Image (tube, rainbow, N blue to C red):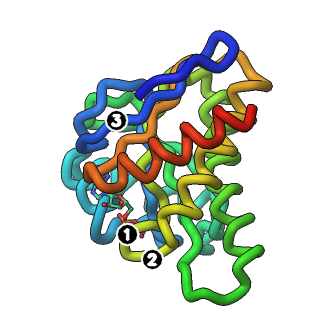
Amino acid sequence: MEVAIRKNRLQLTVGDITKQKVNCIVNAANGTLYGGGGVDGAIHLAAGPKLLEACKLIRKEQLKGELLPTGEAVITEGYDLPAKFVIHTVGPIWDGKEVERKKQLLANCYRNSLALAKENEIRSIAFPSISTGAYRFPIEMAAEIALNEIIQFLKREPFGNVSMTLFSERDYEVYKQTLDKLIEKD
Ligand code: ADP
C-alpha cells in the first residue's frame, strides 16, 4: 500500500528490513546498543561487526558511557547493508502501566528518528514495527502512533519516502487498516 502526502510517499510493505534498498533503515535497539534479538540481531548480522564497533563508540563518546534513553535516536553507517545509514532508537517496553507515557515514548522514537534522518539529508527511510516484538506493545496502538507521527512529519516537511517494513502479513494488515482509517479521517 502506498499513499502520497504532499510530495512525499508513505509505503507499507512486508519484508526483511535488512534487505531494503533505502538510504536508511531504523533499528529497534535497546539502550546498550550492543545488539540483541529480533530485528536488532538481524541488522547487526547483516551489517557486520563494524556496526557494533560504531555503536560502542557512540556509547563511549556521544553518550558518555550511558544507555541510549528510550525514545531517543542515534545514527551510524550501514556497513555491509544495502542501506547507507542505520538509525538506532529504543522503544518503550509495554507492561500495561503508565500507558500515556509509553505512547509518548513510542511517538518520540518515530519523531526523533525522522528528525535525525532529515538532519542527515536522508531521502528514504524504512522503519520496522518498533516495540511490538519482544517489547510487547499492542500492535493496533503502536500502528496508530507510528503512522500518525510519520503522517504529521510528511505533512510538514519535504522529505521523500518513508516505508514501514512489516515482518508478517498479519502485522501488515493491522498497519493497513490503521492507515485506511487515518486517511479517511483526514
Ligand atoms: P522490540 O524489542 O522493539 O519489540 P523486536 O525486534 O522484538 O523489537 O520486534 C519488532 C518488530 O520487528 C516485530 O514486529 C518483529 O516481527 C519485527 N522484525 C524482526 N525481524 C525483522 C526483520 N528482519 N525485518 C523487519 N522486521 C523484523
- For label 1, the crowd category at 10 Å Cα-Cα, with few meaning under 14, some 14 to 19 and many 20 or more, is some
Q: Disc 2 designates what residue?
A: 136
**Residue 133 - label:** 1
Q: Disc 3 designates what residue?
A: 13
Examine the rendered structure and indicate whether residue 121 appears above or below residue 109. above
Check disc 1 and give the amino acid type: Gly
- The percent coordinates of residue 77 (x first, y second) are 42, 37
The kind of secondary structure element at disc 3 is strand
* Callout 2 touching callout 1 (CB < 8 Å): yes
Say which label, 3 or 1, has the lower sequence index: 3
Q: Residue at x 54, y 54 (%)?
A: 143
Q: Is mark 2 within 8 Å of ligand 1?
A: yes
Q: Is mark 1 within 8 Å of ligand 1?
A: yes
**Residue 74 - label:** none
Examine the rendered structure and indicate whether residue 108 appears above or below residue 101. above
Check disc 3 and give the amino acid type: Thr
Determine which quarter of the picture holds residue 176: top left
Horizontal side of 16 relative to 141 (left or right) equals left
